Structure formats: structure tokens, C-alpha cells
Amino acid sequence: MTTSGVWEKHEQAVARLRASYAAIPPGAPVRLAKQTSNLFRPRAATTAPGLDVSGLTGVLEVDPVARTAQVQGMCTYEDLVDATLPHGLMPYVVPQLRTITLGGAVTGLGIESTSFRNGLPHESVLEMDVLTGAGEVVTTRPGERLFDAFPNSYGSLGYATRLVISLEQVPSYVALRHVRVDPELLAGTIEGIVATGELDGVRVDGLDGTAFAPDEVYLTVATWRDEPGPTSDYTGQDIYYRSIRQRPTDLLTTYDYLWRWDTDWFWCSGAFGAQHPLARRVWPRRWRRSDVYHRMVALERRHGVVDRLDRRAGRPQRERVIQDVEVPVERLTEFLAWFDEAVGMRPVWLCPLVAQHDWPTYPLERGATYVNVGFWGTVPVGDDAPEAPLNRAIEATVHELGGHKSLYSEAFYDRETFDRLYAGEHLAAVKSTYDPDDRLTSLYDKVVRRR
């Protein structure tokens, strides 16, 4: 298709989106009509039509000279990477799951191993077109009120239809070192890598970690390289997270490195039996993906199979603890010690990040080092499980330590606390400008009241 044809189809898709918005009755919830989601936040059922985003799922163009890409808002990172890697380029931050969309990562935040030097996905966005609550498409850029309030707004300010992003050059291979670190030295080691960009004299291009137990923590340092060599494949029988303990070094293609966590949804595929050697042989490769496991979780939650089995077996009811939190690096050891005592879930994922700019609705301190701690599973708590005692305790502890919690999962804040933590007054002021009739659900109603 010619360049003009691509843009013509884009304009037609935007027109359909605006028409679908206008067709939603006033007072009805405005939501995307999309088949997949990476959210773990239940919401109220609705029969109202959703926004037609069916034509907004692609890459419009890649400029290998300027190292930029023009991308539609519902384009998945899987499709985006497929378009940029042939040019030896990749987005500055590629969230670890294939079906996360670029628009979703910008309005809902995203993170990966390059975040210690590149921040979060929205920090490499140069320009956006946003469908606002007034039904208009507004072009916005860094430094403008709508742009700067958009990260962590989760659709409460509108939906991105087109984004211009910066790309970075990347070679064909990634060399890994899995370095076991004394837990007491973990925070200092991370700070050293962030400050110098290297470990033991070797450049570090990507940095994340896995804490398997209180006394067993690994940092995985990645170095881009052009030199070929024997590479590992973790889409078959071998499982990536297990390799961290088994081998001190590794080599992956850049493509496989970007999706190393997706095949087994970090380690969560084990809950479905997908890591058992016999089951894995018959489990089709095309189904070894995070979006497949996510749909299985949604199906189980809809029918409550596990809860019924636990009741029949006399086991205590389980609380789902699925969260990502950002903790200042100097409080990381303290948080992990509390987490082990209060929650007791391992492994956990560790991903350092440094915000490059000030963002009012997710107010990380610019230039400071935080560590994302990700933990996803269930914990037996008994009859109190419906009240989410562990999730509530995590919220309180994270903010006592000066951190922040991502809002893709369940949240329990009272309104005053929520507004204080996530710039509620500022967000409301921006929303009143771009959604004067209040057609879009507010952030608090979305993430806490689940509307």
C-alpha cells in the first residue's frame, strides 16, 4: 500500500472512531471495543456500544533516518517491533508483554529493562493525537497540559489515535549475565549500575532482576552486541526464568530478548500446567503467550472454579495479589523484608527505572532511581479474602516508603488519598477543559469504583 493509502485509511479509521463515540448515549460508559486487555481490574458490566478502534491497530510509517515511527494508538508492541526491528531500531522502552498497545502503555504506563536509562514509554513520545471527551481529535506535544497529564490517566482524558515516538538503534543480539547479588548489597549495586551505565567494566543496556527467595536474588544485565553466536530459545521446552538460576551467561536474538517474559507470562504459566514437560510438548507454541493465559484467568474468574475447588477441599480462600509498585531504591530492602513477612510471595520481578521528566499524574521524582517490584499470584488468607487485606496493606506500605502503585489492577484508596497521590485536582482541571460534559469516566471511578 502506498504511503498516501496508509494515511487515507488512518483518516477513515479516525472518522469511524468519532462516529462510534457520537453514537454512545449520554450517561453511558465510554469504553474501547477491543478484544484483549492487560488490565486486572474488574469493572461494571455494560451493554452500551464501545468505541470502534478496529482501524487503529497498525504502524503508519517508520523513518530510519530520523529514528522515529508514527503509530496508531491500538497498535500492539508485537506489531510495532515487527515493523522497527528490520531497520535495526526499537522503541526506547518495550513493555514485556506482546499485546500491550502503545496507546495503553502511554495512558496506563509501561516498563522494561531499558527503563533505568530511558524512563517510561510516554517519555519517548514526541506528539500525540487524542480523541477527547468532547469528541474532537486534538494534537498535543510535551509541555502542553493534555500531553503532560495523559500518562496514568487510563482513558479518563481520552484515547490516543496516533503517536510519534523516538526509536533507538539496536543490534541483532543481546548478551546476558545473570549475576547473583547479596540482598544487602542489592540496592547499592543497582544504584552503581544506574550511575555508571556498567557493571564490572562492561556496558549495561538493559537491567532487571528476579528475587526467587529472600536470600536468592539475581540481576540480569543485558548488553547489545553485533557478534553472532549460539543463541537460546525459550519458546520451546526451555523456560526463561529458570535459566536465570541455571546459567551465568546467555545469548538471545534481540527479538527473543524483547519477548523473553511473554512465553510463560514471567512464571505465571505454571498455574495452568504449561511448564510441565509433558504438557509443554503438546501445548501449541502459538498458545504459549501472555494474552492466552490472561484469557484463561478471565474465564476462571468469571466461573470461580478455583474458589469452588478450595471450598470443597476445605482450603482457606485465596486473595489475588497482582500488583506492580515503584519503590525508591534506598527503601527496596525494607520493602522486600516487609513483603516477605506480610505476603510471602516469590518470585518477584525487579525493574529499576529513572523518570526523565516531571509527570503530575504519576509524580515520580525526576532523576531519582526507583525499582518496580512486580508480584502476581494468589495467597491463602481465609474468610477475609473478599476484603483484600493484603492488597490494602501493600498500598499503605508502598506509600509510607515514598513509592507509587500502578493502577492496572485493583485499588482501594479513599478519594482524598487518591487525589493526593495522583494529582486528582490537576487531573480534574485538565479533564474539565477537554471533557466539559464529563462523558469520560473519571480516573478514580475507573480504578477504585470500577465503573
Image: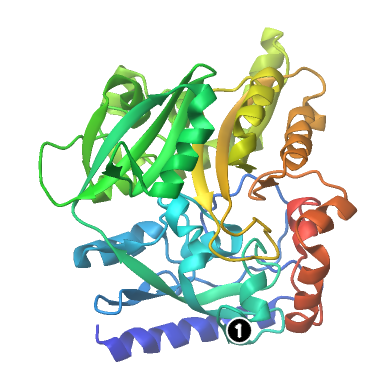
- Residue 444 against residue 432 in the figure, above or below: above
Q: Quadrant of residue 277?
A: top left
Residue pictured at 46% horizontal, 50% vertical: 116
Query: Position of 79 compared to 16: left or right?
Result: left
Pinpoint residue 308: horizontal percent, then vertical percent.
68, 21
Q: Does residue 304 appear in the picture of this structure? A: no
Identify the image quadrant of the N terminus. bottom left
| Residue 310 % position (x, y) | 67, 15
Q: How many labels were placed on the picture?
A: 1
Choose between 349 and 99: the one closer to the eye.
349
The image position of residue 64, as x and y in percent, is 25, 75
Q: In this view, does 380 lie above or below 372?
A: above
Residue 444: percent from the left, percent from the top? 79, 58
On the rendered structure, is 40 left or right of 24? Answer: left
Q: Mark 1 points at which residue?
A: 19
The crowd level at tag 1 (other Cα within 10 Å; few <14, some 14-19, many 20+) is some
Q: Residue at x 47, y 64 (%)?
A: 102
Apparent side of residue 347 relative to residue 378 in the rendered image (left or right): left
Q: Which amino acid does label 1 sit on?
A: Ala
Would residue 422 be seen by someone viewing this image from the given angle?
A: yes
Image height of 135 relative to 285, above or below: below
Q: Nearer the viewer, residue 117 or 30?
A: 117
Identify the element where label 1 is drawn. helix
Residue displayed at 64% across by 49% down: 406
Which quarter of the figure has residue 320?
Answer: top right
Give the camera-side residue of 95 and 181: 181
